[in-house]
């Protein structure tokens, strides 16, 4: 509870809320009430009667027409001297506000409070009590009290805004609602340091602290103020005024988590059916009516709205249904657009009430999209929404199907949209979160299918479509899906063989655990082909398990050997370990030197090969000189002539002798050259 430091000063400046008029024509000691009639305590008889509903005010013309432009115009423009009665049932604030205005006209002291200032301000505007008739008239003084006293105080702003509920459209046109809403929003968003506080949100067990007990009930300046201190006070407002306050708070930049928490707190108070088994603590729920009645500023507020029983024809129930529908529609329109601003459980409960109360379809669709944004946070109890339409199924399976479609679209949008993070961060963080969300949603859908499969009116097509809505990568294990299929087969024993095969087609036997395979192998409700697939999958899993266990045994044995070696080394003396370390260093040094020698040998071998090539090249150049080439030509010509002459006459020379000659000539030729 906020109290401004300047509130006391403002109160003293305006006489503590006591309003008087110095100039008046009739001396009076006040007003006297007799039943529903009011009389002026004076010796002068009254000559003017003002009727407001059942209340009658016996007054005098002159004090009224001198300060009210409306009454002056009525009295003097009618040209009826016998006019002595007027009916004003449409005056804002009713008889209470007119009583205060009449007392002001007679100069009687008027006690201004946060509870009556809004009605008095509207009545002054209705009666046209402006500065044109008299300086310091009622409009001026009421505006001064609003601006300098009410708007500087948290509690007075709340009370005035609450009192404006019966003053529409006057309070709206005079900007009282807007100014109070902005004052509340500014104080809710302000830094709590240096502010004196008093709380009306959670009453004490002994007695509730009053707003005026500032010094006794205010905590010290060093005490930390909870961020939700304003929730309880704001929740007493009517839904349209609460929307104005929340809108102003959002404009001023409050965190969306706090705004969402305030909306949930308001909903738990005004929609009790929303929290049938969870939400606010027990003593807070039990004390709602006490705190509401104490903080409503004496207004006729009745705590909260009750749940509507479907099918009742009572007029009060229809009015309550209309009010609840307006509350749900207003709350949906002001929920912050950020994800996780409110819980998924709250959204699903609000969606259930929206469907039950037949809220506008556009708002229902908006709620469904919001649930799809955080569908992985839902629970099975929240998803079991009854079918309020004339459908055959017990639960609204089509609604869950739409929620699942919104979730898939949202996940695809997030995975395809460019991220502000780097690519590696997106791969490691974003994709992992998406896979985890899909896995949680897959388990949730399997549990939901298991629950709704007991409904004999659930068609096979709806079951199959809902089971196949998620991609195959979302389920790493199909045990939950097998459990749902088995439950559906139990509840629908009349399915044909083709329908059972079609039902089991949504399940991947390779993703069943060994326990599920053992159960499915003995399940007589499954088709024979599915049982064979399960047995085959079971055999593969057992083989893989045996292979994995053997590999683990080998790894454990090698690990044991390494451990034994480490233990043996640790058990050897320290001197032996140091000698072994020095020997290892020497061996490494010798290896390095050997590698160096090998490298030098390869370099020498390469140099020798290059020198040999140069030597051979020089020999070839000497063989191709001019003298040796001419000598070779002459010797070759002589040998050719002798061979031609002796080819026919001489006998054939044996091969051995010819070979010796060739050898001799080759040796002679080499020697000559």
Image (cartoon, helix red, strand yellow):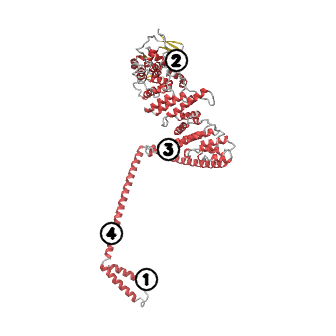
Q: In this picture, is 214 found above or below 371?
A: above
The residue depicted at 54 percent of the width and 19 percent of the height is 53
Q: Which residue is mark 2?
A: 51
Vertical comparison of 200 with 500: above or below? above
Q: Viewer-nearest of labels 2 and 3?
A: 2
Label 4, secondary structure: give it. helix
Tag nearer the camera, 1 or 4:
4
Q: Earlier in the sequence, mark 1 or mark 3?
A: 3
Tag 3 secondary structure = helix
**Front: mark 3 or 4:** 3
**Marks 1/2: CA–CA distance:** 165 Å
- Quadrant occupied by the N terminus: top left
Judging by the rendered image, the residue that carries numbered circle 3 is 413
257 vs 595, nearest the viewer: 257
Image position, residue 383 (x, y; %): 58, 36
Label 4 crowd bin: few (<14), some (14–19), many (20+), radius 10 Å: few
Give 523 or 590, whichever is nearer the viewer.
Answer: 523
Residue 611 visible in this rendered orientation of the protein:
yes
Task: Name which of mark 2 and mark 3 comes first in the sequence.
Answer: 2
Labels 1 & 3 near each other (Cβ < 8 A): no
Q: Rounded to the nearest whole Å, what is the CA distance between mark 3 and mark 4?
A: 75 Å
Q: Earlier in the sequence, mark 4 or mark 2?
A: 2
Label 4, label 2: how far apart the Cα atoms are: 138 Å
Q: What residue is pinned by disc 1?
A: 656
Q: Residues within 10 Å of mark 1 (few under 14, many from 20)?
A: few
Q: Which residue is mark 4?
A: 614
């Amino acid at each position: 509870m906020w109290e401004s430091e300047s509130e006391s000063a403002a109160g003293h400046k305006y006489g503590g809320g006591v309003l008087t008029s110095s100039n008046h024509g009739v001396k009076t000691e006040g007003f006297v009430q007799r039943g529903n009639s009011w009389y002026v305590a004076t010796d002068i008889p009254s000559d003017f009667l003002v009727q407001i509903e059942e209340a009658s005010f016996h007054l005098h013309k002159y004090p009224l027409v001198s300060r009210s432009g409306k009454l002056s115009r009525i009295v003097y423009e009618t040209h009826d001297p016998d006019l002595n009665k007027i009916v004003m049932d449409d005056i804002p604030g009713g008889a209470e506000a007119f009583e205060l205005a009449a007392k002001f006209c007679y100069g009687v002291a008027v006690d201004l409070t946060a509870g009556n200032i809004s009605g008095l301000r509207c009545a002054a505007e209705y009666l046209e009590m402006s500065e044109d008739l008299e300086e310091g008239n009622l409009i001026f003084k009421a505006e001064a009290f609003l601006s300098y006293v009410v708007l500087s105080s948290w509690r007075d702003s709340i009370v005035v805004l609450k009192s404006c509920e019966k003053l529409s459209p006057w309070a709206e046109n005079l900007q009282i609602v807007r100014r109070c809403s902005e004052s509340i929003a500014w104080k809710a968003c302000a830094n709590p340091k240096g502010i004196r506080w008093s709380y009306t949100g959670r009453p004490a067990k002994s007695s509730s602290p009053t707003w005026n007990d500032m010094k006794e009930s205010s905590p010290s300046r060093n005490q930390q103020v909870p961020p939700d201190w304003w929730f309880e006070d704001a929740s007493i407002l009517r839904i349209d005024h609460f929307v104005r306050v929340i809108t102003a708070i959002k404009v001023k930049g409050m965190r969306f988590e706090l705004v969402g928490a305030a909306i949930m707190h308001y909903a738990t108070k005004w929609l009790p059916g929303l929290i049938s088994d969870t939400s606010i603590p027990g003593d807070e729920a039990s004390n709602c009516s006490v705190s509401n009645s104490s903080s409503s500023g004496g207004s006729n507020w009745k705590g909260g709205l009750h749940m509507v029983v479907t099918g009742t024809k009572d007029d009060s129930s229809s009015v309550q249904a209309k009010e609840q529908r307006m509350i749900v529609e207003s709350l949906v329109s002001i929920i912050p657009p950020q994800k996780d601003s409110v819980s998924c459980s709250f959204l699903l409960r609000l969606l259930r009430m929206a469907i039950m109360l037949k809220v506008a379809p556009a708002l229902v669709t908006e709620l469904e999209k919001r649930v799809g944004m955080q569908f992985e946070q839902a629970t099975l109890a929240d998803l079991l929404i009854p079918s309020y339409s004339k459908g055959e199924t017990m639960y609204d399976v089509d609604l869950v199907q739409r929620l699942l479609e919104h979730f898939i679209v949202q996940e695809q949008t997030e995975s395809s949209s460019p991220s502000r993070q780097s690519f590696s961060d997106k791969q490691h963080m974003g994709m992992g979160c998406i896979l985890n969300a899909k896995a949680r949603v897959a388990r949730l859908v399997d549990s939901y299918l298991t629950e709704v499969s007991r409904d004999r009116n659930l068609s096979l097509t709806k079951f199959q479509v809902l089971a196949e809505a998620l991609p195959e990568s979302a389920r790493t294990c199909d045990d939950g899906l097998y459990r749902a299929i088995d439950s559906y087969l139990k509840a629908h024993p009349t399915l044909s063989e083709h329908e059972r095969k079609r039902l089991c087609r949504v399940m991947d036997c390779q993703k069943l655990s060994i326990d599920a395979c053992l159960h499915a192998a003995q399940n007589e409700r499954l088709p024979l082909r599915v049982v064979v697939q399960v047995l085959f999958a079971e055999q593969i899993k057992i083989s893989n398990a045996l292979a994995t266990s053997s590999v683990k045994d080998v790894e454990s044995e090698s690990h044991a050997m390494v451990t034994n070696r480490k233990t043996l080394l640790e058990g050897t003396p320290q001197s032996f370990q140091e000698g072994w370390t020095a020997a290892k260093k020497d061996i490494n040094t010798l290896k390095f030197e050997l590698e160096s020698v090998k490298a030098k040998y390869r370099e020498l071998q390469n140099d020798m090969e290059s020198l040999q090539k140069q030597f051979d090249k020089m020999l070839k150049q000497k063989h191709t000189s001019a003298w040796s080439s001419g000598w070779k030509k002459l010797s070759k010509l002589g040998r050719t002539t002798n061979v031609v002459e002796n080819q026919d006459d001489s006998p054939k020379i044996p091969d051995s002798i010819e070979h010796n000659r060739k050898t001799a000539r080759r040796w002679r030729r080499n020697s000559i050259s």
